Amino acid sequence: MRTIYWDYENECVRLIDQTKLPDSLEVISCKSVEELAEAIKRLSIRGAPALEAAGGYGVALAANIAKDMPAAEAKEFIRYKAELLSKTRPTAVNLFCGIERVLKTALNAEDPEEIARLALDEAEKIANEDVERNRRMGRYGAELIPDNAVVITYCNTGRLATVDWGTALGVVRSAVEQGKKVEVIACETRPLNQGSRLTCWELMQDGIDTTLITDSMAGYVMRKRKIDCVIVGADRIVRDAVFNKVGTYSLAILAKEHGIPFYVAAPSTTFDWNKSEEDVVVEERSREELTYCNVKCMKTLIAPENVKIYNPAFDATPLSYVTALITEKGIIKKPYSVNVPKVLGF
């Protein structure tokens, strides 16, 4: 099952509700752009590549709803809904790539039914390309993973963060597919525990040896155990930094201190090479994510209700801490200012 897909029978977007895992595997339907936007905001769908597909499908959904409108009204409606989608999460650049790509393709037509057809065709291309490039990325990255490897990863970078296969976890899956023995140490990834809830669930589904640790244990584990590498994903890569789930920077510092390679696996659409760290807006999320251990049901208070909260969703890791970038076009090593444009064609 793909993380997100178009339901042709019901003409809607279907996606795995990641807020329910690992308790239950539930698929929800988004029949309006507003429903999809809310799913993105509450992290029912998350992960940069998955958000690229969500952006594309969101525009296709808007176009499908507008196919019986007059042409000018349909185009205005689609642009308005695309703007609504673009305001859901500010940091992951892939979301905007998906939205803009489908808009550009579909709005070249004049007939609303043709606009809807082109929009859905392009959204499906984005989804299919994501699976293909993750597979290619995985094959390249697997070259960096030795047999009998112990890998530390962070957040969730597998099937659930993409349409299928995964970025950093896709590298692990590809290495295992090649016959290598790999043990994964998954950091829990506070405050929403995407590592413990999602990464551990995925890897155990695949039968891959998985050990869960708290985020604060990473340094101790690196010091006491043989760790072959750290592999993480990314939500945006600019010319001087990698933006990823908050806590990634700390892991990079620990890896450098212990002489452990630190790899970042991300598709070319995650690169925003014309920008630098200071240009990127870092999303800040609600106080409830830190003050309650069950955000949805508000069951258990784990901090004083009136304590001040700072809850950025992402941090920036300087590229100087990154040993190599793993992409669908190959492995990129330093100097990144030269080799990223060379390999990716920027």
Image (tube, rainbow, N blue to C red):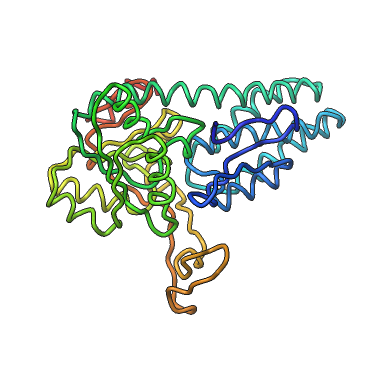
How many numbered marks are there?
0
- 295 sits left or right of 74 in the view: left
Please report the residue visible at 37 percent of the width from the left and 53 percent of the height from the top.
Answer: 189
In this orientation, which residue lies closer to the viewer: 169 or 324?
169
Image location (x, y in percent) of residue 342: 32, 20
Q: Residue at x 49, y 72 (%)?
A: 300
- State left or right for residue 109 relative to residue 297: right
Nearer-the-camera pick, 74 or 137: 137
Q: Is residue 183 above or below residue 174?
A: below
Please indicate whether residue 16 sits to the left or right of residue 267 in the image: right
Query: Is 33 on the left or on the right of 203, as rendered?
Result: right
| Quadrant containing the N terminus in the rendered view | top right
| Quadrant where the C terminus is found in the figure | top left
Foreground: 239 or 13? 13
Q: Position of residue 19 (x, y in %)?
A: 54, 51
| Residue at x 62%, y 23% (from the top left corner) | 122
Residue 279: x and y in percent read 43, 46
User: How far across and how far down the image is residue 32, in percent?
Assistant: 73, 42
Residue in view at x 33 percent, y 24 percent = 177
